[in-house]
Image: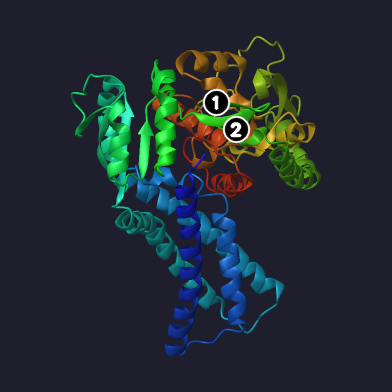
Amino acid sequence: MPNHRDRGYALLHKLCLMALVFIWFWVCLYLWEKWEYPLINLPWNYALVAVAGLVVATFGTLQNYGSFFIKTGWRRIRESVMKANFQTALMAFFVFASYFATKDNETSRLFLSFYLSTCWPLMIGSNFALPGIFKRLVGIGSLKRKSIILGEATALDGLSNWITRHSEHGFSFEGAFSTTQESPHTIRLPWLGPYTNLESFLSENKIHQLVVIPDRNMDDWIPLVTDLATKNGCRVLIYNALSGFFDSRLVFVEESGRQFFSLQNEPLESPFNQMVKRTFDLCISIPALLTLLPLSMLIVKFFQVFQSSGPLFFRQERVGLAGKRFVIWKFRSMTHDSSGARDEAVQASPGDSRVFAFGKFMRRFSIDEVPQFLNVLKGEMSLVGPRPYLAEHDYLFQRDYKAYRIRQFVKPGVTGPAQCRGLRGEFTDPSLVRQRIELDFNYVGNWSIWLDFEIVVRTVGQVLFPPKSAC
């Protein structure tokens, strides 16, 4: 869960983007008038609608704001561009929806296109620069936030790199106390002695924060230390020593009045979030079943009759939520194996002889996936989620990739975070498979309805302009 500082950064980021978008609209309007191009009608309407689109685009998309600070330059640029793409697309949708809804024939569509196209680099630059600006501004005001750290000597040595990084965020470590008479060896801080000297040190120095590292003997000293910190107005941070044993970040949860750590954040554990996601699924799958499915059934059957006779649908067992197996529905894109001798677990590859001519077209443009809206309607799948695999593939991935089954904490999807980025088709490159699985993990831990919406929008682009890996 983000801390209050990161949530505050995210809120400031959104407010700055809204202000920039609003001000930039009037700058563009001034330039438009100066260039003597046709003026626009209802300028306040379009300015506010653009801001509304940005509000929707940024809602829930900055929840991991703190992680942006520790990313490398190229990863920051990539993330800034991805956010700008989504933000500008939503703004364009809102602006042109307003244009057509109001039947505003007096407004120049060229101006609206000019405004939105110039907003895109503005969004990229702002998404990239604002975190660094906030960090520097807050850091300047926090230089006097003096801190000390207390723990076992070996534990202090193990945190020397973390202390260096933490100092860059505005905290100035004054030194370290140890819980024994032994002094640390590699830590780059003054050793202030055993914790028994803490009371006198706090009374003589203005300390803002005390970082505590628990150890096996903490029952002897931690009540005294926390009492002294409270008495002297120190903020206490208790280091989670368990985090070093796990690759993923531990998540604080509360169950039946007791406090626990979990290895995975799960937004879809919330019944409200489940209801929102299910509503989103039905709002798209029901219209798709009523419109797309009947028409596509006629077209697909027509080509199957002439190119590859056999059943219209292909059904196969897949692994879904909590490892439960279900039958997935697809349009048949391969020649029919009436004998049942063919191994259906063998993946299709480019130029596969089993795929008939129109079947290749269906697979490339994902037409064969349309019947999966039936699985969504039945509740076996969701519109968005990790793609379900065969049980045979599931076993291989579980063997080769640690914590693979985390992706089964949510329902499988018709599309997913990997597929909307072009990572689809045959499993040939282990690094790409790992990238798919990591995207699935990230989806499980950071789900929001806006993330689902973004993935759907990206998927539409992938369907219209399929990648080379689609086969």
Q: Residue at x 56, y 32 (%)?
A: 265
Name the front one of labels 2 and 1: 1
Residue 121 location (% of width, % of height): 40, 63
Identified at 65% across, 35% down, the residue is 268
Question: Which residue: 18% across, 23% down?
Answer: 185
| Image coordinates for residue 21, horizontal then vertical, percent | 49, 69
- Residue 105 drawn above or below residue 441: below
Q: Quadrant of residue 314?
A: top right
Label 1, on which residue? 262
Secondary structure under badge 1? strand
Residue tagged 2: 266
Residue 58 vertical placement versus 276 (above, below): below
Task: Please tell me whether residue 164 is drawn above or below residue 214 in the rendered image.
Answer: below
Identify residue type, mark 2.
Glu
- Res. 424 in view: no
Seen at 40% across and 37% down, the residue is 229
Tag 2 secondary structure = loop
Q: Nearer the viewer, residue 152 or 54?
A: 152
Where's residue 94, x and y in %? 62, 65
Left or right of 459 on screen, residue 233:
left
Q: Are marks 2 and 1 in contact (CB under 8 Å)?
A: yes
